[in-house]
Amino acid sequence: MRLHALTTVAITATLIASTASAQSLGVKPGKWETSHTFTGTVKAQGMSMSLPGKTTTDTQCITEEDATFKPEDLSGEECTTSNVQSTGKSISFDIDCSQSGTSMTGRMETTASNDGTSMEGTMTMEGSQPGGGSIDMKGDFSGTRIGSCS
């Protein structure tokens, strides 16, 4: 499963996420710097391996049009979302993914600052893989508006 790719998309999406009625999370368009760190544990065949925390930082331009994302947009062949809750400055949802015998369930929660220039959130995922192994992951992410898009 391309879980890293999925979580990167989901984190970026929650930066500008909206509810099913396409209401914005309330972040200001512009150039944003986002960071995310993942940690976790993989257990298989009686052994346990910790995944060291790795922080990735990206810079991207968030436009007014980007604010049309809905958690349901992550649904498809591999993943479905449910239990979407939004207040205009926060959003949370459950996500279930399955691919090649590996299944993961989790929850994402994001909150934007009152002035819309920063955000932070968490993601937790747990699941099973073929052969009886398990995966537990946690991600922390944040974003800050650093200026206008050029």
Image (spheres, rainbow, N blue to C red):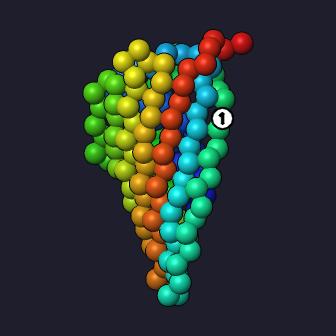
Q: Is residue 81 left or right of residue 14?
A: left
- Rendering quarter of residue 12: top right
Instruction: Spot the residue most to the bottom.
Output: 46
Q: Residue 27, how many percent across, how many down?
A: 45, 20
Return the residue nearer the eye: 149 or 80: 149
Mark 1, residue position: 58
Q: Residue 32, how many percent across, how many down?
A: 59, 24
- Graded by Cα atoms within 10 Å as few (under 14), some (14 to 19) or many (20 or more), the crowding at tag 1 reads few
- Rendering quarter of residue 31: top right
Q: How many marks?
A: 1
Asked if residue 80 shows in the view, the reply is no
Q: Is residue 24 left or right of residue 133?
A: left
In the structure shown, which secondary structural element does the residue marked by tag 1 occupy?
strand
Give the residue displayed 40% in from the left and 26% down from the top. Answer: 112
Kind of residue indicated by mark 1: Asp
Instruction: Spot the residue most to the right.
Output: 150
Q: Residue 17, how many percent across, how many down?
A: 43, 31
Q: Looking at the figure, which quarter contains the C terminus?
A: top right
**In this rendering, is residue 28 above or below 111?**
above
Asked if residue 43 shows in the view, the reply is yes
**In this rendering, is residue 61 above or below 35?**
above
Give the residue displayed 44% in from the left and 34% down from the top. Answer: 120
Return the residue nearer the eye: 58 or 92: 58
Q: Residue 106, how many percent across, how many down?
A: 39, 55
Q: Is residue 23 left or right of residue 100?
A: left
**In this rendering, is residue 13 above or below 82?**
above
Give the residue displayed 64% in from the left and 44% down from the top. Answer: 56
Give the residue displayed 56% in from the left and 48% down from the top. Answer: 37
Q: Looking at the figure, which quarter contains the N terminus?
A: bottom right
